[in-house]
Image (tube, grey):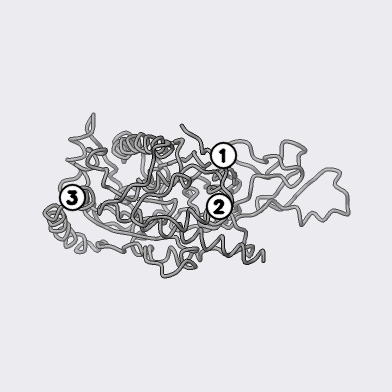
Amino acid sequence: MTQFRHSLDSADIDALIANHQPGYSLEQAFYIAPEIFEEEFTHLFSRQWQFADHISRIPKQGDYFLFAIAGEEIIVVRGEGDTVYAHFNVCRHRGSRVCLAAEGHVKRMTCPYHAWSYRLDGSLAHARELPESVDKSKLSLQPCQVRVFEGLIFINLTAEGKGRVPDFASLVEPLRPWVEQADLRHTKIAHVESYRSQVNWKVALENYFECYHCLASHPEWCKIQLHALRDAVGTESAIETFEKKNEQWEVRARELGHMAGEMAGNFDFPDPESCYDAQIPYAERMMVNDNSGDLYSSLTPNGADMPSKLLGSYKADDEGQTDWGLTPSCFLYTTCTYSTVLRITPLGPLDTEQKVMWLVHEDAKEGIDYDIESMRWLVSATLTQDRQIVEDTQAGVSSRAYVPGPYGELESQVPQLQSIYLRALAYGRALRNDLKN
């Protein structure tokens, strides 16, 4: 893979942002340059609410896991009761990693280098032979902010009161009516898979937000998902067929007391300052397909035995699903019996992880209420196909022959996201320069 061929200075980055042609893909530097990745960390990754994992991963006090993003590693640990803490995994003595295992259980977090130990809240508990003149209260692990929404753990790398971050409550509260019926707080992780690719995170995110590629690349998905008629085929007759069938399904769903309809994501931000705090919540509850269980079973290699235990307060499996999430890292498909959760995480300029987990009712029993192979098949097949797609795309945008190309109508959300992204970078860089001056 071709590496970026020269360093960018501040003026180069300003020019790249200013000269972007709306409706076209980004210039090559945005997909490969480490200088731009550092700008993204400063103005995006470190300020945005990042989905880390589901609360069932740390059910007991002292349970922890490590979350990696953009070269940083965060300890996410369960405290007393429902309290969750997050700390940078950096000892305050001489910088060693404190927790080495990817997950585990601790009474205290002890650095393996000189045995400095920290309480679960990050405060320094013990440091042998530390001079009495040193104030231990100033040697806590560097904290992150934590919020839990419907069982999903979100963290923000900017400590409380240390910088401007989006208001979490205002982001997620519009989602609550669409997701509370599933009650994901009382689910558990049934299965997890990770798809790591040597690609820029925007290549993966842009791929997720368009289905122009789905007919050619995801034939199984298109056969099962009725909304492929609208989002992948996109002709007037195909859209009409989807809407007619979905409207009939909506009547049945509402008769059961289930949500139906759409809370469209707001991509319209009036000025660069509003883009700086932009994270987009969206939700749509719609029909999967006619007799979706039988259809799914007919397409899987060995038939399918989909989860049967209803989530939350659903009264029956209405063959619907809620497509919902919070950009840029958390994307879910939630049915009446299970939910898939996709997390897209930038690890480096050319290193991205797509991690997917399947949630089932907390009392569901494997082999009785759900079968992992049946449940994972479609998403796993789709993500395997997507990994090849994004790797091929990254190879192309890294080529000397790459020039930005135009987007089609079925890719309309991608240039909208790019406009928000560019205006956020521009505003953040100008704000930083103003503070310097």
Give the amino acid at mark 3.
Leu
Residue sitting nearer the eye, 312 or 88 = 88
Residue at numbered disc 3:
229
Residue at numbered disc 1:
103
Q: Earlier in the sequence, mark 2 or mark 1?
A: 2
Report if the CB atoms under discs 3 and 2 are less than 8 Å apart: no
The location of residue 381, given as percent across then percent down, is 31, 35
Mark 2 is surrounded, within 10 Å at the Cα level, by few (under 14), some (14 to 19) or many (20 or more) other residues, namely: some
Q: Secondary structure at mark 3?
A: helix
**Left or right of residue 294: residue 49:** right
On the rendered image, what quadrant is the C terminus found in? bottom right
Residue sitting nearer the eye, 371 or 137 = 137
Using the image, tell me which numbered label, if any, was put on residue 39: 2
Residue visible at 62% across and 59% down in the picture: 159
Mark 1 is surrounded, within 10 Å at the Cα level, by few (under 14), some (14 to 19) or many (20 or more) other residues, namely: some
**Left or right of residue 220: residue 85:** right
Residue visible at 56% across and 39% down in the picture: 103
Q: Nearer the viewer, mark 2 or mark 1?
A: 2
**Left or right of residue 252: residue 90:** right
Asked if residue 296 is positioned above or below residue 154 in the image, the reply reads: above
Q: Nearer the viewer, mark 1 or mark 3?
A: 3
